[in-house]
Structures are given as C-alpha cells and as structure tokens.
Amino acid sequence: MRHFSLAVLFFSGTASAQEPEVARAILVNKRELTAQLQIFLDQQMFSPGRIDGTPGPFLVNALKRWQRAHAMPETGVADQNVPLDSVYPVYIFHILEKAELKYIGELATKPSEQAKVKYLPYASYSEYLCERYHCSTEFLAKLNPGMKFGSLKVGDQIRVPYVEPFKLEDMPPTGNLPEKPEFAGRRVVVNLKETILDIYEKDALIASVPIAPGSSAHRTPPGKWRVLGIASMPNFRWDKGVLNRGIRTKEFFMLPCGPNNPVGVAWIGLSKPGIGIHGTNNPNSIGSFASHGCMRTANWDISRLAHMITKETPVEIK
C-alpha cells in the first residue's frame, strides 16, 4: 500500500493559472507531497484550510470526509484509493496583471479610520496571491525562493498551487445573492468540536470547510436554524458593545466592503439573531475558537460556500 504518490508535478513554462501546460515529474520531499494532498482535497471541495505543505487536523478531517463521501473507510491516510495523480500539475505560474493592482492599497488598522474609506483592500500583493490560491504566506515564499513580493512588476511570474482561484473580481457587488431552488435539498451541519462545516445533498456529503466558531466568552449557539439570506461583499457594523457584551450601542462604525472587511467577502445570515457564517480578514484564525459567536471561514471558502446553498437552507449546529 502506498501512502503518497512518489512524484509531484511541477509546472514548466509560461502560462496563466487557467492554462497549465505539460509538466514534468520530479522526486519531492514530504512537504510537497503533503501540499499535493491538500491541493487534491481543495479541488474536491473538501477544504484542508490553508495550503502550506504541513500535516495537521484540518488535512486529516478533510481527507476523512472525502473518504466518507466516496464510501471508503475513514482512515485519514492517503492510500492507493486517493487519486493524487489527478492533481496535474501541482503548481502553476500566475502572471501579474495591471488590473489586479486595484485590489491592493493602504489599509487603515483602526475601525474609526476604516469607516472613512470606501473599500478595505488587500494590504499587499502577497496577501492577494495567498487568498487567490488558498495558501499561507510562508508556503508562497517557499515556492518562490528569493522573490521580493514588494517589488514585483506587471508580467512577472509567481509559482502558486493549482487550485480554482478565488477571483475577487467575480464576486457580485454588495447585495443579496438570488435564491436557488435547485439547492432546496441541501443542508448544513456544523461540528463545533471539530471546527468543521459540512454540506449535504439530502444524505450525501458533498463538501466541507474548516471554521472558527465562537470563543468561550461568546459561544456559537447549538441548535437548528435556517439561512435567512446570503450577502455578497457586505458592509460591517462594528460595535464594540455587540462584540464584547452582545449589546447594541449607539457608538459604532460602519465599515465598507472589501477582502479585509472583518466578515470578509460574504455573509450568510441565520434565523438565530446576530449569528451568521462569514468570511474573514484573518485566515490564520480558522480552527481556533476566536469569533464572537458567528462561524468564520477563509474568503476563498466562503465564496464557494455562498454559491452552494440558498435561502431557507437548514443549518444544524452541534
């Protein structure tokens, strides 16, 4: 029984992330093999969290759920039944385009300052790339040794994981997404202990994403709820009273939309008042009990999740 493919495929040549060319196989280390598995699971919509080439509970949980979805023993081990060779190539090149730079800019840190601007952009091009290709900043640097991300220019090529890019430019403008009757048979189950959100089509598990639920001071409420609506590129009412004590006050700041909005690029409101599933400006927090009662996930995951469910979708939190 093999537990990993013996080779990983590196992109060779010049192309955009959507047009991979033929790659060549070379022997790799454990980090690259782990990244190959992470990329495979991400492609299958069983998100392992940030792609970083590091084993961990997110990777094991994602693999077990993929195995469950395919009626396999839930071992959490990549054996001969996991088609890692389908990840072809593992890495590709992203070419910097001028149009991307409009999503990067100076980012104020205080809510009082953020409320004065029209948009909350990425603070750096590397942050933009990491969200677009679902990876950590450390892993991006390892894929591109010696590269100075602060001085890149149009036309430069950056090696990135081969995943479906999170395209901020394709997010609908601020407003509610339309209802999708074809998703009426879907349901969401949130496992607070494992910090995982699962999506089912009736009884079939079709996707999962890691989350950050509420902290011990602001617990995510167990129970059976439903989706009231899904908002794209939301604004956020920053109220210290709500965040710290759950009490709405008159001293608040209305923060504009953008990838660095505290609730990220999408908000899924639930029938439990004040509770939702949303993106985040801090993907490093996913997996910790760090929210104020809501369930946050990475922007690349919430953007996909928002297009997989609809209004009235049942949500069970347990």
Image (cartoon, rainbow, N blue to C red):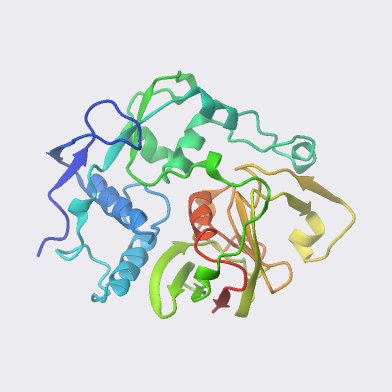
**Which residue is depicted at the point 51% across and 73% down?**
190
Say if 224 sits above or below 84 in the image.
below
Classify residue 187 as left or right of residue 94: right
Residue 278, image quadrant = bottom right
The count of marks equals: 0
What residue sits 41% from the left and 80% below the top? 203
Expressed as whole percent of the image width and height from the top left, the position of residue 110 reads 74, 40
**Picture coordinates of residue 39, whole percent (x, y):** 32, 50
Q: Quadrant of residue 247?
A: bottom right
Quarter of the picture containing the N terminus is bottom left
As drawn, the residue found furthest toward the front would be: 181
Q: Residue at x 56, y 65 (%)?
A: 180
Pick whichever, 260 or 286, lies toward us.
260
Residue 171 position in % (x across, y down)? 57, 46
Above/below status of 30 relative to 273: above
Residue 228: give x, y in percent of width and height: 67, 69
